[in-house]
Image (cartoon, coloured by chain):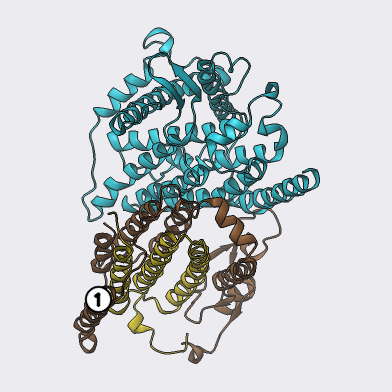
Amino acid sequence: MAWDNQYIHALVLIIAITVAFLTIMLLVAATVLAERRVLALIQGRLGPNRVGFGGVLQPFADFIKTMMKEDLVPDQSTRFVFLLAPMIAVITAIMAIIVYPFGPTITLPFLGTFPLRIAQFDVALLYVLGVTSVGVYGIALAGWSSNNKYSLMGGLRSSAQMISYELALGLSLIGVILLCGTLDIYRIVEQQSGWYGLHWNIIYQPLGFILYLIAAIAETNRVPFDLPEAETELVAGFHTEYSSIKFLLFFNAEYINMITVSMLATTLFLGGWNGPGVAQFPLLGVFYFFAKIVFFLFLYIWLRGTLPRFRFDQLMDFGWKFLLPAAILNIVLTATFLYLFT
Amino acid sequence: MGPQLSWYLALSAVLFTIGAVGVIVKRNVIAMFMCIELMLNAVNLSFVAFSSFFQDVTGQLFVFIVMTVAAAEAAVGLGIIITIFRNRESLDVDDANILKL
Amino acid sequence: MAIGCAIAMVSQSNPLYSAISLIGVFISLASIYVTLAAPFIAAVQVIVYAGAIMVLVIFVIMLLNVEHSEPRRKRLKFLVPMAIGMAAILLAETVFILHSVQTTENRLPGNISDVGLTHSIGEGLFTRYLLPFELTSVLLLMAIVGAMSLARRTSTLSATARVVPGAQVLAMDIANPSGVQDLRPVETETTEEAAHLLGVDFQSDRSKQA
């Protein structure tokens, strides 16, 4: 920001955080709706299309309905943990969005230039991984504090799956880090500009991209890796005992996680806000960024409608015996190519 | 004048003492293990404080290695705890007073 | 806040609350590291300590289902006052040392400090301190092998296992895991037969029990 005043800086940050938060919330609502409609279309039926024009008010209707439900709190000694778990899940899910650049540096007529991001620091990528690691607690503590054997098993299975795939997630990103030489997400996106899209990291890291995508889907507990959640549909799961607002918090946390990993995929592999014409119209970068995120969300929903789910031991086998060695192979190959050609 | 080095060292000493008290006082072997981790972290804090005040990267490197060692020790230690629990059905260190498993 | 969480951790009797307080300590320490211009160490602290080690500890607590600890036995009641006394002595020593030693460099950590950046840590790790780095990786390998060998299911049927003839029904695929999932029932008559079917040893000598 061109101004050096500390208070103006803080005010700009607060405005930026509010805008980003509202954007993410709207995106979550849109994703909920899109999921139901696209899933329905894949399955050969129409989704909800009566509330509002074409169903756009459906998520808000769902929100109001869920708020009105009775809020059950179990009568036992772990009440504090029971209340804490969904808060941890949502807080860590949202905390990850502050490092992503929504667009290039834009110049407003009176206010000077500012880059469209909330925070830029040296270890941004590690921060995102760290926040994802802490998000596992939300699920583990929720499973335990429900005082319900099925919840406990569901929670433990889900957190075991998440920590196994976190490893593959982190390792698949090391290829990108080797290529770009920095952990700062803003600079990684800047390095992918120019060359009409041929500088995007997906071209240099195809294996890393696929591994990252698989690990991200497993990390967010989505199909085909959603056995701990499918237990919710079938028997029980870690959020059986949660109702009303707390369930909404978990539900939101899952979608925000989906959006966060999609944002990470677009910034690291698909070039973030880069696209044709961004140099002349910087605001077009924001549009491209969201277009790519929507593409990934569509991919998530598409996979949900198409693939069956893994059994838990198959899931863990896949994570440890296939993804982890493949990610290490990716690192070795990337390092070898970098050494030979630089 | 901002935070001085001695403040960070004092915090590290206090955390270490709390951890040491915890190791002696606690009977549950998992809680004792967590107090050991607290002591390790207190030492990490003093390393990082020194490294920052003397602008030397060695402190942070050593912290990195200490963290790795702590992670390895956590894995093996928890494995031992689980094995002891399987054989004795009690997580009380006072019960684990014979060498025979 | 770090001290508050630490005291909470030591004073809680439920180990799960101790674990949560310890996570609080780790996260507050990570923020202290950020103020000390060590962002890489802060991020690694969150990922490794708060994100992985404590998850392991919480798994173990949940699996072993520990609850509150029992009251202390008589002959060990002296431990609490003794511990507090020793802690007081340790703190007094610390205060004495900190007052008497001249801390020369009272510089703040500079805002534009080069030390904590990932670049300098990586540089140091791979050039000057390569040997500790390699030794650490060997240590991690040892830990992995050790943890796996500890967690392997022991292949002996415990001496207290009893098979009541005609009461338990095993599924065939336990005895013959190579085939498809075969749920035909297998009946056993004695414990030795069950042990033989499961492919484990059976200590028929009860006097060997620990």
Residue A165 horizontal side relative to residue A242, left or right: right
Colour assignment, chain C: brown
Is residue A55 depicted above or below A325 in this figure? above
Q: Nearer the viewer, residue A199 or B80?
A: A199
Q: What's the residue type where badge 1 is placed?
A: Leu
Q: Quadrant of the N terminus of chain C?
A: bottom left
Give the residue at mark 1. Answer: C91
Chain letter, colour yellow in render? B
Q: Residues within 10 Å of mark 1 (few under 14, many from 20)?
A: some
- The chain identifier of the residue carrying mark 1 reads C
Q: Nearer the viewer, residue C190 or A79?
A: A79
Picture coordinates of residue C141 (x, y %)? 62, 68
Is residue A197 depicted above or below A332 in this figure? above
Is residue C192 depicted above or below A176 in this figure? below
Q: Label 1's element?
A: helix
Q: Residue at 57% of width from left, 70% of height from top?
A: C143
Picture coordinates of residue B9 (x, y %)? 33, 67
Colour assignment, chain A: cyan
Picture coordinates of residue C181 (x, y %)? 64, 53
Residue C73, can we see it? no
Picture coordinates of residue B73 (x, y %)? 50, 71
Residue C114 horizontal side relative to residue C201, left or right: left
